[in-house]
Image: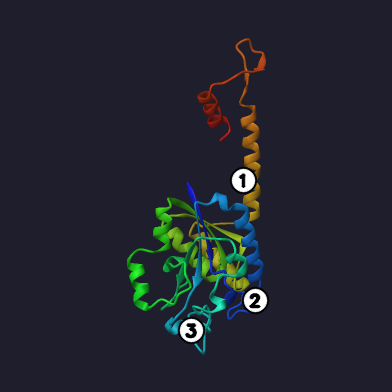
Amino acid sequence: MAKALIVVDVQPTFCEGGELGVEGGNAVAGRIADYVNAHRGEYAYTATTQDWHIEPGAHWSGNPDFVDTWPKHGAAGTPNAELHPAIAVLGIAHHFKKGQYSAAYSGFEGIEDNTDRIQTREEVTAEQSAGKTLANALKAAGVTQVDVVGIAESHCVKDTALDAKRLGFDVTVFEDLTVPVSEELGVAARKQMADAGIILAEARRVASRYEREATRRGACQRQVGVVVSPDQSCGRVSLSADLTAHLVSAYCA
């Protein structure tokens, strides 16, 4: 089963000093970068999402309610709309821009655009119609499981994870690689995700479990050549490749 990692909206606009800065955003960006460097080989597909607002209508407001309307943020072509420097250097190949001409929270509302150009409304519509979406990209890569990290847990991370679940993917959100706007909103978001069947886990614990399992399997495979001989004495024998593969599959899975 192929896995994908979706890095949601890790941009300066959502970190300390940004227009909608979340406390702890810069630290989360650093932890995500460390995780990607350590685990990129486990993923068949890795993508980022970005708020890339051009003319998002009432989503921007001079008198925001911080529920449906917000101060100007994630303005396309500005430094704060770029990927956070810790993420930008990772060499991730796939980037999905969202919210060009409307409000957008889920990464599944975006289109793949690996440039920093300012698209026209017609270009965005045409690329959506052409299927340059995250959902189609994951399906083309054979992905069945999605891990979601980023900013903010209470908003775009939550909505991206919920959409992934609705689309039929097995979804995990790594809580130590995301941060909510507030603890209260974080509690509500985690309940909503858990109720939808999304796994909430800590990346460091999952990684440790995988490492222990790999060590166990390696030890088991080294012992496959030790069998009981017909006279019931224990000794090492030479096994055919097919038999060795069968034993590894049967006893070291």
- Residue 79 at x, y = what percent? 56, 77
Q: Residue at x 49, y 56 (%)?
A: 197
Instruction: Give the residue type that dot 3 points to.
Output: Trp
Up-down: is 138 above or below 75? above
Q: Determine the secondary structure under disc 3.
A: loop
User: Disc 1 designates what residue?
Assistant: 210
Up-down: is 208 above or below 194? above
Q: Quadrant of residue 221?
A: top right
Instruction: Give the residue type that dot 1 points to.
Output: Tyr
Instruction: Give the residue type that dot 2 points to.
Output: Glu
The span from disc 1 to disc 3 (Cα, nearest Å) is 43 Å
Task: Determine whether, in the image, residue 242 is placed left or right of residue 184.
Answer: left
Q: Nearer the viewer, residue 162 or 49?
A: 49
User: Disc 3 designates what residue?
Assistant: 60
Q: Residues within 10 Å of mark 1 (few under 14, many from 20)?
A: few
Residue 202 seen from this side: no
> Residue 146 has which mark?
none
Task: Determine whether, in the image, residue 132 is placed left or right of residue 205.
Answer: left
Q: Residue furthest top?
A: 231
> Residue 16 has which mark?
2
Q: Earlier in the sequence, mark 1 or mark 3?
A: 3
The span from disc 3 to disc 2 (Cα, nearest Å) is 20 Å
- Residue 57 at x, y = what percent? 42, 83
The colour scheme used here is rainbow
The span from disc 1 to disc 2 (Cα, nearest Å) is 33 Å
Q: Nearer the viewer, residue 42 or 102?
A: 42
Q: Earlier in the sequence, mark 3 or mark 2?
A: 2
Q: Determine the secondary structure under disc 2.
A: loop
- Residue 200 at x, y = what percent? 57, 58
Q: Residue at x 40, y 54 (%)?
A: 139
Up-down: is 201 above or below 153? above
Q: Quadrant of the C terminus?
A: top right
